[in-house]
Amino acid sequence: MTTKTHGMTMAKASPDDFKTMWKISKLMQEYGYQFHPDDGRPRAVRIKNLIMARLDQLGSGGFMRIVMGFEMLIKEVCAPEVEHLALKPVLGAAPELLQELRNIANADTIEWDDRSEFEAWAKSRARAAIAKTTEWQP
């Protein structure tokens, strides 16, 4: 059985994409703090031209990889009920859940006289671990 885990597949933004975007951000902050949008002074024109050159360097592909990639991560990985970046409860609880599954998988069945008792114990532990995923808080 194949389970669909996400709605789209896309290329990751490269380290160069991020470097260029940070340069654009810095230039935009500098421009926004020092100049009026219609400012024709040489430094304002130079910064505007640098912003446009960096955007051109980044290209629509790099820009979209950053924006759409972040949007996809927020949708698929982040908890929608909070206003900051936080993992969905099931993802945040994954390490604990994995450890509990390891404990169950590595349990010594020799200690159990009745296989059905072991099965009940294992199912109970697994259900408790799964239930914790819905209660997990960042």
Image: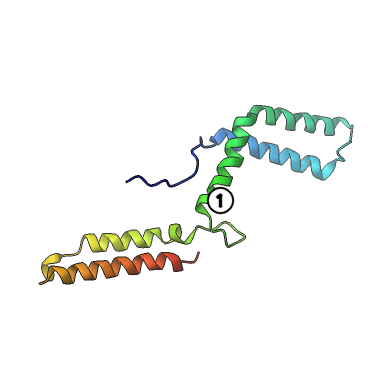
Quick check: 41 left or right of 118?
right
- Residue at image x 26%, y 67%? 123
Instruction: Give the number of callouts.
Output: 1
Residue under the point 50% across and 40% down: 8
Q: Is residue 83 left or right of residue 27?
A: left
Residue 61 visible at all: yes
Does the rendering let one see residue 58?
no
Front position in the image: 121 or 3: 3
User: In the picture, residue 124 is in which quadrant?
Assistant: bottom left
**Where is residue 92 shown, x and y percent of the image?**
45, 59
Q: Is residue 22 left or right of residue 93?
A: right
Q: Residue at x 39, y 58 (%)?
A: 94
* Residue 3 or residue 107, whichever sits in front: 3
Report the residue at 84% width, 42% height from top: 34
* Most foreground residue, 5 or 89: 5
Residue 37 placement: quadrant? top right
Tag 1 secondary structure: helix
Residue 64 percent location from the top left of the image: 61, 36
Provide the residue designation for mark 1: 74
Within 10 angstroms of label 1, few (less than 14), some, or many (20 or more) residues? some
Q: Residue furthest front?
A: 1
Q: Position of residue 50 (x, y in %)?
A: 74, 30
Q: Amino acid at mark 1?
A: Ile
Q: Position of residue 30 (x, y in %)?
A: 77, 41
User: What colour scheme does the image use?
Assistant: rainbow
